[in-house]
Amino acid sequence: MTRSLRVACLLAFTSVTKGNFRIALLTMLILILVALNLVFVPGLLDGLAWGANDKLINTYSSDIVIESGGSSHYISNVDQLLTEIEQIKGVEAVTARNYLGAEIEYEGKYLGAAVYGVNLDTEKEVFTIADSIVEGSYLDADDVDTIVLGIQIAGADNPELELYARSLQSVHAGDTVTVTYTNNMKKNYTVKGIFYTEFIQTDLQSYVSNTEFDTVAPYLVNNASVIYVKTSEDADSEEIISRIMSTSEELRITTWEDHAGLVDSMTESFKIIEIIIDTVNLLVAGITVFIVTYIDVAHRKRQIGIQRAIGITPAAITISYVIRAIFYAVVALALAMLIYKFGIIPLEARYPFHFPFGDVFLQISPFVLIRTALLLFAVSVISALLPVRGVIRTKIIDAIWG
Amino acid sequence: MIKVQKLTKIYNMGHVKVKALDGVSFSVVSGDMLAIMGKSGSGKSTLLRQMGLLDLPTRGRIFLGRYDVTRFPEGQRARLRLKYLGYVFQEYALLGELTAHQNVYLPGMMLGRSGRDYKEHAAELLKLVGLGKRINHYPKELSGGEQQRVAIARALINSPKVLLADEPCANLDTISSGVVMDTLVRLNHDMKVTVVFVSHDPADKQYARHILILGDGKIIEREGEIA
């Protein structure tokens, strides 16, 4: 076997360095395109999922969501609970919100929505909604009689919005809306700002300051409907949840993954699409590499016959083609990765794909890289082996003299 | 050394069967220099390919020493071709991507000799056939006669017992032919290698110790003492 391997290495090396350059170039170009395809599609889908999850965490759910698990809709004694949670290792920030159902009216149009009372000091440490203001400005801690609306509520004369038809359609910053809460409190608010996070569930929310909310529902002071916890990247969520649970038994705690239903089902569908695209891609690659190798081997049929005639074993000849195929695959994979990392990713970052929940940036994961490499090697080797085996089985005199 | 017994080869050319060899029998003793001659289509090359274990006869047997190698499996035939038989093709049959040196040492490498051994031996053989200064040239950089001498050196790399040469001078000019045939004679005389060569040129009789003349796949004349 060692002898066959040594001879195979020599034959493969000379075949690569002295063989037909155009055939080698064509084979590698095909493999580069296949590798790019194999990396690009999952990269895009991963980017989609990552983008959606990022929006979900930073504008809607944070990392951990705490609600009341008892008979009351509200978590009581919130100030003390927040202090305890802040001290847990791995917790970066905590904020609490109260909300009431309400009907918002503007120029004869009505819309049902939840109005949240937010703590402006801690809110900005957990969420990035304040960065998504497209009209006016965000709330300040002592604001009263003002409200900020999600764009899917305001409409903002933007008919391209997904929920424009059911929105208030023409509300802009500075306009006045009338809010009737479910506790029968009715108030006129000046719209201080409109935010557009591109995450529909968030853009359907509206916020007032806690100062304002306390005037609407003074009986909810030191209570909260929801507490949102932002954790550090390397935090152990399970451990944090367990610590929070130990502070009170009447809490219902969920993670951002539990709120990712839409993203999850989207990701599942994408995985199926990815498998179909990858299968077709690999079949096309396999057949193309097979044809290129077949033509190459057909040209070398006589050479292979001579090699066998002078005593080179079929194993050595076959291994030489396998080595050559792996070499082409390695070079193609390396070139594809360089093109992807230093060409496609920066280009896409400059001109990103825009999806309903924002810009999507290509991702690259070690799993996808390893899978791509293995698939590429397998396709190259199988596509190279089949034609070689055909020639190896031909009689020597037929291979040499036709 | 080599014994051919009632060897018959029939080629199926569609519906037509062509009898290229028809019950040929003879023996070649160790150290002999045998020429197989005859007109074009007489079966000379077919006979040499059977002796070189490149093809399977339809009937008859071939003995190498005491062993009937006619129906050996391909793996063993490859081993015999590598170790005991050197084959020189009419059209040189060098590997174009390898240098003269690599072409020569490739079968040595396959036999498993150490790198230094086969590389040095290949260089010596190339020197022996007069190409000591051209070992790093590729086949396309060599003349026909030089390529044929590289092919002879390659056939000798594993010190075969028998060297089979199929019309080694067919594509060469007179001067190159003389050099190639002189090389074969020298190998036979100095290295005691048994040489069997095929030629259609009556002038090549001068190089042989014994001669077989074929016609229509049969031996029609034997010159010298051939069993």
Image (cartoon, rainbow, N blue to C red):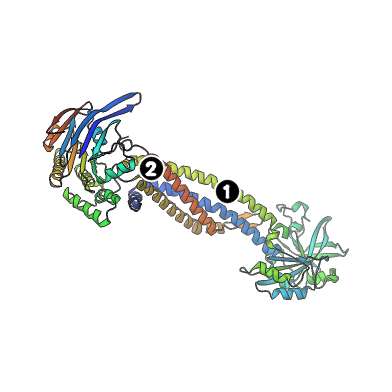
Quadrant in the picture for the C terminus of chain A: top left
Determine whether the residue tagged by mark 2 lies in a helix, strand or loop: helix
- Image quadrant where residue B174 sits: top left
- Looking at the image, residue A59 lies above or below residue B90: below
- Looking at the image, residue B18 lies above or below residue A248: above
Q: Which residue is mark 2?
A: A296
Residue type at the position of mark 1: Ile
Give the class, few, some or many, for how many residues have Cα within 10 Å of label 1's Cα (few <14, many ≥20): few
- Looking at the image, residue A363 lies above or below residue A212: above
Residue B202 pos. (x, y %): 14, 32
Q: Chain of mark 2?
A: A
Q: Chain of mark 1?
A: A
- Looking at the image, residue A78 lies above or below residue B17: below
Q: Which residue is mark 1?
A: A275
Residue type at the position of mark 2: Asp
Left or right: residue A379 compared with residue B216: right
Q: Nearer the viewer, residue A201 or B88?
A: B88
Which residue lies at the image location 15% right of the left edge and 45% below the top edge? B192
